[in-house]
Amino acid sequence: MKFNDLPFIPVILGSDITAYSLARSFHEEYGIKSLTLSMSQKGYVADSSFIENRYFPGLEKDENAVKRLLEVGKEFEGKKKLILFGCGDWYVRIVIENKDKLSPYYIIPYIDEDLLNRIVLKDKFYEICEEIGVDYPKTYVYECGKENDMKFDFNYPVIAKPANSAMYHYAKFAGKKKVFKFDNEKDLRAMLKRLEQTGYNYKFLIQDMIPGDDSYMRVLTCYCDKNSKVRFAALGHTLIEDPSPTAIGNPVAIVNEVNPDIVAAATKFLEHIGYVGFANFDVKYDERDGKYKFFEINVRLGRSNFYVTGSGFNHVKWIVDEYIYNHLPEYTVADKECVYSVVPKSVIEKYVPDSQFKRHALKLWKEGRVARPLIYKNEKSLKSKYYAYGNYYNYIRKFKKYATPQK
């Protein structure tokens, strides 16, 4: 496959919707094909017309990923600048931990390992929030493998989630979920016992459950330049999230909005710690005190990153302008409304509670202001389209199984 005659190539680790959205953003902006390294031999990424996918089994293992990345790096050495992206916390950690080996061949727009370890662990993230006055949920830190009194100053029901998402990725046990809700200590301890038997030996967070449905959530994407100054921010208001156990909490429909207070808090956090590259925050509005509580930071573009590009602000420009063309763009806050969706409109109509927000989202959809990352008119591969539509309509089955229709 020949790549567009530009001085760079995006190299993407992964084959999920994050990878496709990122490759699509590059294709839309520059007409360029991306190179993916993945463990998938078929699917909307592997079969895409604007992606060269190279299949490597066992790629999530550090030594395998580094080996393959070095092979690619040497292949293009002196020919193209390679911009490296990881789709998934484990891929990002592999890239960051091996910067010294990979940096001779790649542009790596990520923070260093010391800072990664400070903020990607959610308990450490909250310590920084406390230090600088950024709001976050009340949290009890459970130490896996140790005695824990389980005494905290909030009541059941509670939310429980791993402090180390990358380590949790490898934990296999019955009833595993991305995020748990528990009504009592007995059930909570039973899950933690099963978890500890997997070898997961870091911390698990028990949190005050902030009331409110999916529409109380926000997702924020920011870009920090090499000098750790925030150059770009795009806020999304979640309409509905994935209801399935292993993906719960992932937004599947988002409407862009503007909220200076949320952006200001994120900017304060990022510039305080000296952040570089893209950051993705999960935030929830707490109607009890009228504050927005920061849940976590992802040191990468999020799964739903196309809500940014789809609204008219192609996020890959910030990376390319700075790292390829040595140009720093003006500070920008995305301010165009658009509905991002990976589900059919029928899912929104059936499963989102009636509200002014829902009606407004459907109005935007009717006006054609909708961005669907996997549905791309410039995708020429029928196989890729087949998998994309299959994934799209698979959500109908998911919601039928795990969600309750709203009247």
Image: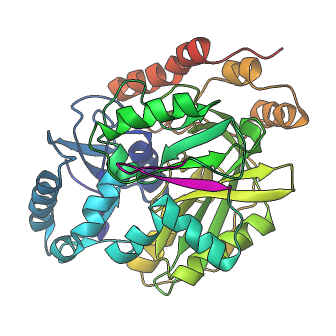
* Horizontal side, residue 140 vs residue 287: left or right: left
Furthest toward the right, the residue is 356
Which of the 4 image quarters holds residue 171?
top left
The answer to whether any part of residue 71 appears in the image is yes
* Magenta highlight on residue 144: yes
**Which residue: 38% across, 39% down?**
16
* Residue 315 appears in the rendering: no
Q: Residue at x 76, y 21 (%)?
A: 349
- Where residue 88 appears, as percent x and y from the top left, is 37, 49
Question: On screen, 367 above or below 119?
Answer: above
Q: Nearer the viewer, residue 19 or 78?
A: 19
> Which residue is painted at 46% across and 76% down in the image?
276
- Which coloring applies here? rainbow
Q: Is residue 114 magenta?
A: no
Name the outermost residue toward the bottom: 227
Determine whether 375 is above or below 161 in the image.
above
Q: Which residue appears at 9% of the width and 58% of the height?
A: 67
Number of callouts in the render? 0
* Occupied quadrant, residue 271: bottom right
Measuring from the top left, give residue 166's x and y in whole percent: 35, 51
x, y percent for residue 371: 62, 40
Residue closest to the eye, 391 or 385: 391
Image quarter in which the C terminus is found: top right
Q: Which residue is at the front of the view, 194 or 319?
A: 194
- Can you say whether 128 is above or below 167 in the image? below
In the displayed structure image, the side of residue 273 where residue 139 appears, left or right: right
Start-end of magenta stretch: 137-149
| Horizontal relation, residue 67 to residue 241: left or right | left
Locate residue 149, reporting x and y percent: 53, 49
| Majority SS type along the magenta span | loop
**From the viewer's perspective, is 338 left or right of 113?**
right
